[in-house]
Image: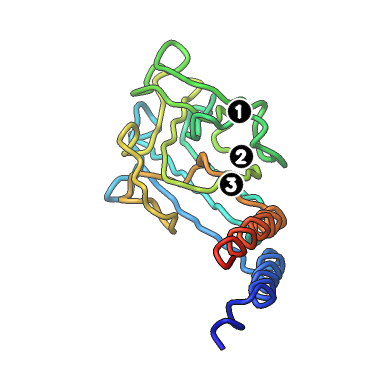
Amino acid sequence: MWRSVRSAPFLMLVLCCTAMALITGSAVGQTSFSGASSSSSMPLGLQGTGAWVSPGFSTLGWVVSQAGPGLPWHYVYSLGVPGCNISQFIVQTSPDFSLNDITNVSGQFSSYTVGTFTPGSSFPNLPGQIYGVLVTTSGPGGQFAFDSPRVPVWGDFYAQGTNSADSVRNVGFGQPNPDVPPANGALNNSKLLVPDTVAVPDANTAVLALFGLLPAFLVRRRRRTT
């Protein structure tokens, strides 16, 4: 009995069922996370300089969603500030993130790029170096949205005003990013969701990889039984 259950045909059936589950699963099961931070609510989620934090306040919201397993993640960031317009803002990403990891870009902005940004004349209030997506815009509020295969993790954010005195960032900027699964809200009221190093595995690729392991497994099994 046990020999027949562990036979190659039975294993093939199990693998086929698993493959079908992977394929059909990619069409269902939307996942979505959202959060927001403010420089006015207690405990503070944002901090900064100038009129953006006193006497006014700034707000940052984000929504990260995936229509189904194996599909790209959709990232939406919305920033609102008082007084002086936004000049540019940065969303942290993993160091190997590139422009190739961004598609279907939309929102209120004039340009965007990816790179390493350091404190200086362009970012006079930036507390430390950050690698990520730099978005250039001009207005008291704006939205930047894009698709990416990179999964969401916790990270940092920084924005600079057209008036160099105005800036805002998440309270936990520069602190180690916790290895904690994504969730709704701001992690410890100090971190937001940003794109990570790991890419979403395509369901068809996963199936091919699964069947690619089958011949090697059967050969090894045959050697053990001979």
User: What's the residue type where badge 1 is placed?
Assistant: Thr
Q: Is residue 194 left or right of residue 65?
A: left
Q: Position of residue 216 (x, y in %)?
A: 63, 55
Q: Kindly report which numbered mark, 3 or 1, lies closer to the viewer in this rendering.
A: 3
Q: CA distance from mark 3 to mark 2?
A: 6 Å
User: What's the residue type where badge 3 is placed?
Assistant: Val
Q: Going 66% across and 66% down the picture, which residue do you hit?
A: 22
CB of mark 1 within 8 Å of CB of mark 2?
A: yes
Q: Going 61% across and 29% down the picture, which residue do you hit?
A: 98
Q: Which residue is mark 2?
A: 144
Q: Position of residue 204 (x, y in %)?
A: 72, 56
Q: Which residue is mark 1?
A: 137
Provide the secondary structure element on which disc 2 rests.
strand
* Label 2 Cα crowd, 10 Å radius (few <14 / some 14-19 / many 20+): some
Q: Position of residue 161 (x, y in %)?
A: 48, 25
Q: Which residue is mark 3?
A: 76
> Which quarter shows the C terminus?
bottom right
User: What's the residue type where badge 2 is placed?
Assistant: Phe
Q: CA distance from mark 3 to mark 1?
A: 15 Å
Q: Going 50% across and 48% down the picture, which residue do you hit?
A: 152
Provide the secondary structure element on which disc 3 rests.
strand
Q: Nearer the viewer, residue 145 or 11?
A: 11
In the orientation shown, which residue stands out farthest toward the bottom? 1
Task: Tell me the number on the disc at residue 154.
Answer: none
CB of mark 3 within 8 Å of CB of mark 2?
A: yes
Q: Position of residue 82 (x, y in %)?
A: 46, 35
> Which quarter shows the N terminus?
bottom right
Q: CA distance from mark 1 to mark 2?
A: 10 Å
The mark nearer the N terminus, 1 or 2, is 1
The mark nearer the N terminus, 3 or 1, is 3
Q: Going 44% across and 54% down the picture, which residue do you hit?
A: 182
Which quadrant holds residue 15?
bottom right
